[in-house]
Amino acid sequence: MKLSSRIPFRLALKQTPEQRSSSIDTYQRTMLHSNLLRLVARGGPKRLMSTATKLTTVEVNDKTGIATLTMNRPPVNSQNVQLLEDLQKSITEIENNKSRGLILTSAMSNVFSAGLDIHEMYNTNEERLRIVWTELQNAWIALYGSSLPTAAAINGHAPAGGCLLATACEYRVMVPNCRIGLNETQLGIIAPKWLMSGFLNVLPKRVAERALTQGRMFTTQEAFEVGLVDEIANSKEEALEKCSAFIGSFAKVNSLARGLTKLQFRAENIKEFEKIREKDVANFIALASRPEIQKDMGIYLENLKKKGKK
Ligand SMILES: CCCCCCCCCCC/C=C/C(=O)SCCNC(=O)CCNC(=O)[C@H](O)C(C)(C)COP(=O)(O)OP(=O)(O)OC[C@H]1O[C@@H](n2cnc3c(N)ncnc32)[C@H](O)[C@@H]1OP(=O)(O)O
């Protein structure tokens, strides 16, 4: 079962708060159970493979059994619906192919991911906005809720949605002279709580609150100093090695116990997210459709283009 599979939330909305909470617990139990089955299945022999979707590739190292998931949408891995869907396909594939862990990285030389593709949100209709936001939610929950060990080899800038993916992972290694952060308030928008939850998991509350209210983009060094990234690497190759070493640190740990312990840590955030996910889509559509937000997006895109031409 994909973690992004819905709980029957439409049904849950018709229930009393007590019934709803019990449905969510049922969902959690089902989720933990299916992850448990997947973990048990992972005990078998390793397979070597290299596969691709349109915008992602998956390569499993035959010696370590670790899968590297690479985003490949030039020029900046901005997250359009296709990339978000391909990420989900690749995560599901890695979960099903007995990999020992997942490393997320980018095929671009200086960008991990530029966050949501603003073109997808600009001058469009409500249905498209619904799809964009739902796929962002689905990609996030697939990564955040994976029982596999996950690490991000951040080989370039990781603003907004890029930071979201990196902080959904358990470990982050970043190359020097890049920036990472949730810059939403700088753009005049408010990130929902679930989008901040990975960030809140890794930073002290006080540091997170200040960074989020400032919309602060941390340099690699600053991110390392506050704990937003765990290590700095001098190259993408070194970042991948450090991520592999992190995943390798679980070699002697029972994978079932490891995975369930991770999910227990994340269960509260996942439960909160599932409670509000439909409302969250509606909120996003309302926000992104506002004329002043559309106007700001147009200006932001123009400025990005101008900057690119300089
Ligand atoms: C104003 C936004 C309003 C949103 C409305 C409500 C939404 C609520 C959503 C809350 C959560 C949302 C999160 C997001 O992810 S929003 C996206 C935030 N991302 C950014 O602010 C990053 C912008 N990009 C950059 O800072 C730089 O591009 C970057 C540092 C990543 C790389 O710099 P570099 O110099 O290497 O590359 P360029 O800047 O020259 O860019 C190359 C081309 O790519 C285009 N580009 C860049 N980022 C995006 C993007 N996010 N979406 C679409 N297109 C993007 C850029 O325009 C260049 O295009 P051209 O080659 O045509 O000039």
Image (cartoon, rainbow, N blue to C red):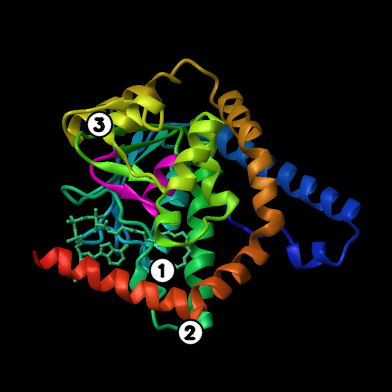
Q: Quadrant of the C terminus?
A: bottom left
**Range covered by the magenta-colored residues:** 154-167
Quadrant housing residue 115: bottom left
Q: As shown in the figure, which amino acid type bears the numbered disc 2? A: Asn
Q: Which residue is mark 3?
A: 239
SS state under label 3: helix
SS state under label 2: loop
Q: Residues within 10 Å of mark 2 (few under 14, many from 20)?
A: few
Q: Which residue is mark 1?
A: 81
- Image depth: mark 1 or mark 2 in front: 2
Which residue is at 42% across, 49% downward?
215
Q: CA distance from mark 1 to mark 2?
A: 14 Å
Ligand 1 within 8 angstroms of badge 3 C-beta: no
The foreground one among 94 and 272 is 272
Q: CA distance from mark 3 to mark 1?
A: 27 Å
SS state under label 1: helix
Q: Which residue is mark 2?
A: 125
Q: Position of residue 136 (x, y in %)?
A: 48, 60
Quick check: is 277 in the magenta stretch? no
Which residue is at 53% across, 39% downward?
209
Which residue is at 50% across, 34% downward?
42
